[in-house]
């Protein structure tokens, strides 16, 4: 797989972290993208149910738009989950994250300054709940996303 270089500022890198609703151990940020290049932050392991997808307004996040587009157009046409670290962006080839396998590096950063390490945090449990009403997927503004982040942080099961 050809690894594509992407320019990134420390500010852009930190904004990717701010978009996270839940963190994933070992990664700065984790997102999923479908074949229509709709992007949502990680909320659970496995296939994210449509009702749990909180789409990011990509017009406000050009770097995320470019990464998702590159993944769908050049790496895996159906999209998938991608993992961001200070070294670049990774994904699994295929339909799932095979146990014990390592993701493939497909974007390398060309940062304007040193990027921070991924904080060491425990892996969160899934946020799925049978008693929760089923929301309709919508595109979120940055303000709405911040509000949701605060809600997820306050949840006792998070």
Image: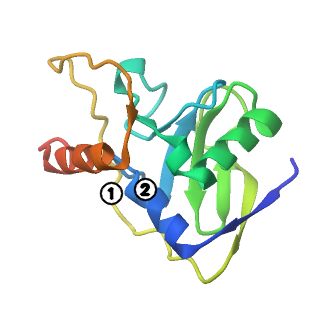
Image position, residue 21 (x, y; %)? 34, 46
What crowding class fits label 1: few (fewer than 14 Cα within 10 Å), some (14-19), or many (20 or more)? few
**Residue name at image x 43 percent, y 34 percent:** 45
Q: Is residue 46 visible?
A: yes
- Left or right side of 154 for 33: right
Query: Which residue is label 1 attached to?
Result: 122
Query: Which residue is label 2 attached to?
Result: 25
**Residue placed farthest to the right in the image?**
2
Q: How many marks?
A: 2
Image position, residue 158 (x, y; %)? 21, 45
Coloring scheme of the render?
rainbow
**Residue name at image x 62 percent, y 45 percent:** 65
Q: Quadrant of residue 34?
A: top right
Q: CA distance from mark 2 to mark 1?
A: 6 Å
**Residue placed farthest to the front in the image?**
59
Q: Are marks 2 and 1 in contact (CB under 8 Å)?
A: yes
Image position, residue 155 (x, y; %)? 14, 43
Q: Secondary structure at mark 1?
A: loop
- Left or right side of 150 for 34: right
Q: Nearer the viewer, residue 94 or 34?
A: 34
Q: Nearer the viewer, residue 138 or 31?
A: 138
């Amino acid at each position: 797989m050809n690894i594509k270089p992407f320019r990134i500022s420390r500010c852009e890198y930190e904004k990717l972290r701010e978009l996270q609703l839940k963190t994933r151990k070992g990664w700065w940020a984790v997102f999923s993208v479908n074949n229509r290049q709709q992007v949502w932050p990680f909320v659970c392991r496995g296939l994210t149910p449509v009702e749990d997808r909180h789409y990011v307004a990509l017009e406000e996040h050009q770097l995320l738009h470019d990464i998702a587009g590159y993944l769908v157009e050049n790496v895996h046409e159906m999209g998938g989950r991608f993992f961001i670290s200070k070294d670049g962006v990774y994904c699994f080839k295929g339909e799932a994250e095979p146990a014990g396998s390592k993701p493939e590096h497909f974007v390398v950063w060309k940062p304007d300054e040193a990027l921070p390490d991924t904080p060491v945090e425990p892996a969160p449990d899934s946020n799925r709940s049978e008693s929760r009403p089923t929301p309709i997927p919508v595109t979120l503004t940055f303000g709405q996303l911040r509000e949701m982040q605060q809600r997820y942080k306050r949840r006792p099961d998070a």
